[in-house]
Image: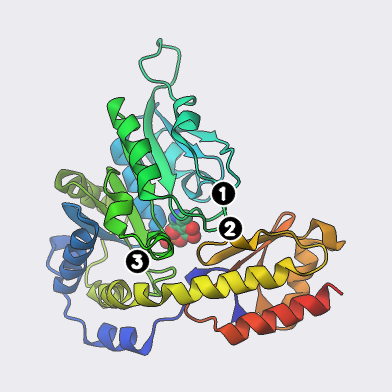
Amino acid sequence: MIDLRSDTVTKPTPEMRRAMAEAEVGDDVYGEDPTVNRLQEKAAELFGKEAALFVPTGSMGNQIAVKLHTRPGDEVVIEERGHIFNYEMGLPAIAAGVMMRPVRAARGDGMLTWPEIEAALHVNQPYYACPTGLICLENTHNFGGGSVLSADETNEICENAHRLRLPVHLDGARIFNSAVAQFETVANLSMSCDSVQFCLSKGLGAPAGSMLLGRKDFIDEARVWRKRLGGGMRQIGILAAAGLIALEESPKRLHIDHENARRLAEGVAGLKGVRVDAEKVQTNIVIFDITGTGQTSAEICAKLKEKDIHAIPFGPAIRMVTHCDVTRGDVETTLAAMKKILT
Ligand SMILES: Cc1ncc(COP(=O)(O)O)c(C=O)c1O
């Protein structure tokens, strides 16, 4: 099976499984799991933030941040294809009582500029406007095709937001992919953001878990909300042990996923009816338009599935994601299958 549906499908490495079996554990709700504590300290140090919290999922990390930065009735400005808005089950409305203000990015890669954000803000406006409480960024941008936001672009947005006393949360589910692609550090990419969430369970290959980072008082409050949302996980050092290896080892090999994604993009770009700019594929996500093939994305994905190759139809496009369980050989096999399907 070649599974290109997402980088969430990765299986833990033998080293992770060994570390999980041998992990020292304690009750993390009491703050007594030494492996979780080590993971949190390590993550905070890597990102240059005061504190970090291990949460079960990226969605929970993001949603706790939305809750803590806002008050009910606030608006949250986000790019219209952002994960927090589209794929987190409407929790901003349920848990935080906020409205989302989706904004279309002129750039095809889903990255908003400060002028685009500024035009959507309600700050110091008369009482009939819903006040803006938070700006959310996403780096890499999943549905923007794994695109990256630079440290300078992030800093510009944050500086302007802070001038208006607005906090910025970064959904950095794949921030390590962004850092590797730009030869940057995750600390520089998130330095000016008030909070950041990243996933251990995606390109980094851990079986589950995400980290939420920010100031110490913010993380203390986040711990309360994690428990309130049912995320107090007790002897969870068994997962944190895999997370520690993901953090230490996996970034070193992400460039391979990026090279494979670029090769995949270059290969499909040469097929009749497929549209994708391979030059713009910077990380591990390839989204290509198949409108010109005369087939639907669902039809093409169904034919790939018959060959045990799995990808996700996305309206008039198909998404393929490379990760540690996809080899260069798998990429070539996929390209050969695509060629057959489209000729
Ligand atoms: C950009 C982005 N943010 C957040 C998440 C949520 O992560 P989780 O599936 O762990 O809730 C995802 C998951 O695919 C994602 O792509």
Using the image, tell me which numbered label, if any, was put on residue 209: 3
Q: Which residue is mark 2?
A: 280
Q: Earlier in the sequence, mark 1 or mark 2?
A: 1
Q: Earlier in the sequence, mark 1 or mark 3?
A: 1
Indicate the amino acid at tag 1: Asp
Measured as percent of width and height from the top left, residue 269 is found at: 72, 66
The answer to whether marks 1 and 2 mark residues whose Cβ atoms lie closer than 8 Å is yes
Q: Rounded to the nearest whole Å, what is the CA distance between mark 1 and mark 3?
A: 27 Å
Measured as percent of width and height from the top left, residue 248 is found at: 27, 75
160 is higher (above) or lower (below) than 52: above
Front residue of this view, candidates 240 and 214: 214
Q: Residue at x 58, y 58 (%)?
A: 280
Helix, strand or loop at label 1? It is loop
Ligand 1 under 8 Å from disc 1 Cβ = no
Using the image, tell me which numbered label, if any, was put on residue 328: none
Q: Which residue is mark 1?
A: 109
